Image (cartoon, rainbow, N blue to C red):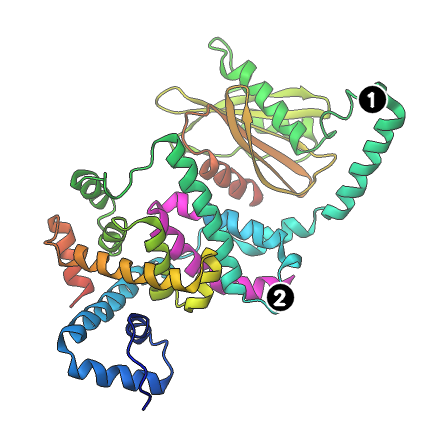
Amino acid sequence: MSNRPITEDDLHGYVDHALEPEREAEVAAYLENHPDVAKRIAAFSDQRSWLRSALAPIAEEPLPPQLNLARMIENRRRRPSSFRWAIAAMLLLSIGGLGGWVIRGATSIPAGGLAALAQEASASYNVYASDRTRPVELRDNTELADWVSSRLRRPVKLPDLTRSGYRFMGGRVVPTAHGPAAMFMYDDDRGDRLVVLTRPMTSDQNAPMAPLSGDGVAGFSWADDGVGYSLVGPPAAGSLRPLANEVRKQVQTI
Amino acid sequence: MSDMLRQIEPLIPALRRYARALVRNHAAADDLVQDCLERAVSRWDQRREDGNLRSWLFAILHNLAVTQFRRTATRGQHVTIDEANEHEIGQNAVQEQTMIYQEALGKLARLPDEQRAVLLLIAVEDLTYAEAAKVLNIPVGTVMSRLSRARERLQQEIEKPADNPIGNVVRLRSNP
């Protein structure tokens, strides 16, 4: 037995089962002779067990789709590495240096990428969501799905946000610099409107969910398997992330 | 790649538990964990091969949570535990009364953020004192003093009479 005095740290180590067996025995012996301290330490031990059992159910809940790690890894793998991006950026910079102002407009937005998509979605939101007369061109689900699928030359699924409190209003085909895009609009009981824009991607074919904000809008954009999506709404509409996750989940099950 | 999946995936439930106990909001906590996982995936190659994966993930998550605390604090929406009144906490419990852990989260919420973090990492997530120090980027001595204060404070909360009937029910079920 050592003659080292028992410290507060030893007592907590005892509660957390973090002591070497020899030291643990010394603390146990000490507690036997000091009932007041023993009472406090017993309370801490009870507290520890209570916390662990009370919080255990959280770790046993099934994981929601937004925490699907396999999908995150897959999305990451299919994206060009940051190294390649760095080379591309350097190339653009050197071209910029040589070409000067001639191409400055062209490089302000990554052509066809997620940033461009987010800007197109924001523009559609600003123009159409504020339109009280004719916000959407078609209200019929089937007719709309056929129309946008034929213009985008791929099956387009209409996301359903009813369970999140947003009704489907309809949609239309909208022009972008990268070809036609499908725009869908939703509203809730307060009249807040949301816009989902989707089109094939020329770059950023797979990109993880990224927030967008500015121009009085908020939202999220992402791309899976060459198709980009952007969900845009008013910044005051609460978190749009669960809605974006919901849309992403639904369109992936085509 | 599958190596990353195999190593990280089993730790997600613990990350969720820590996040929820830290921020007390189901959706906000899962958003934090999602951000954490996305960061972990993108920085996988930058981690130290011999390093402790669990500490690494908890550190990423904790830093994201702290950033969020600061953001909400500057917006002035953050209700600190000392300002939170019985009414607010009681209401919250009613909304999620089916959840057995609500009472524990309610009592934990009365602790200052930094004390709550230390207690959760050590008493619930089983990190060693040295690992917790690394996650929180503080000396081990500070971990010990915060742990001690956290336990004293939580004990006071536990010994206080229950705030509402729901608290009683939960308490009986979790402490037979």
Point out the residue furthest to the bottom here.
A1
Taking the spot 42% from the left edge, 61% from the top edge, the residue there is B14
Left-right relation of B114 to A178:
left
* Label drawn at residue A103: 1
| Image position of A223 (left or right of A107) | left
Span shown in magenta: B1-30
**Whether marks 2 and 1 lie on the same chain:** no
Q: Residue A78 at what x, y percent from top left?
A: 70, 49
Magenta region includes residue B13: yes
| Helix, strand or loop: magenta stretch | helix
Specify the quadrant that holds the C terminus of chain B: bottom left
For mark 2, give the secondary structure. Answer: helix
Spot occupied by residue A138 in the image (x, y as percentages of width and height): 54, 19
Residue B170 visible within the image: no
- Give the image location of residue A186, x and y in percent: 46, 25
Kindly check if marks 2 and 1 are in contact, taking CB atoms under 8 A apart as contact.
no
